[in-house]
Amino acid sequence: MLKLFRIASLVEGFSYLLILCVTIGLINREFVYFLGMGHGVLFLLYVTFSALASHTQNWSVFVWLMVLIAAVVPFAFIPIEIFIKKELTKNEQST
């Protein structure tokens, strides 16, 4: 589940940056509807996978809330990626 969350985190983070590029005018505003819909679906997947990963990894509520807050902060998917890599390494060492 953690690997799926990692993929969802990266894709959602990049889609958020793409939406921000539309907002500041780097990308044509004709694509707002499609990019917004795609980002919305990716955000819902991110929330779902974060809840499932939190449950399987026994994260505290505080950690899960920090992961959720990171979804609305630009470039915060990078520290989440580092955190997930550490969790995957910890899981591999424990087995």
Image: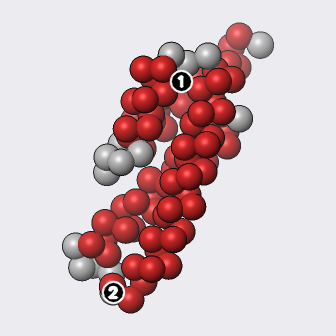
Residue 62 image point, x, y percent: 42, 20
Q: Nearer the viewer, residue 84 or 42?
A: 42
Quarter of the image with the N terminus in it: top right
**Is 36 in front, or is 81?**
36
Residue 17 shows in the view: yes
- Dot 1: element: helix
Which of the two labelled residues, at mark 1 and mark 2, occupies the earlier sequence position? Answer: 2
| Residue sitting at x 27%, y 78% | 26
Residue type indicated by callout 2: Asn
Residue 29's tag is: none
Q: Which element is circle 2 on? A: loop
Q: Is residue 38 above or below residue 90?
A: below
Total marks in image: 2
Q: Position of residue 82 (x, y in %)?
A: 46, 32
- Quarter in which the C terminus is drawn: top right
Tell me the CA gap for discs 1 and 2: 38 Å
Disc 2 target residue: 28
Please provide percent x and percent y for residue 48.
61, 43
Provide residue 73's location: percent of width, then percent of height: 31, 46
Looking at the picture, does residue 62 appear above or below residue 34?
above
Q: Which residue reaches farthest left?
A: 24
Q: Residues within 10 Å of mark 2 (few under 14, many from 20)?
A: few
- Return the residue at label 1: 86
The answer to whether residue 78 of the structure is visible from this angle is no
What amino acid is labelled 1 in the image? Lys
Residue drawn at point x = 71 percent, y = 10 percent: 94
Give the residue drawn at x 54%, y 68%.
Answer: 38
Depth check, mark 1 against mark 2: the one in front is 2
Q: Residue furthest right?
A: 95
User: Given contact means CB atoms under 8 Å apart, are the residues at marks 1 and 2 in contact?
Assistant: no
Dot 1, how many residues are within 10 Å of its Cα: few (below 14), some (14-19), or many (20+)? few
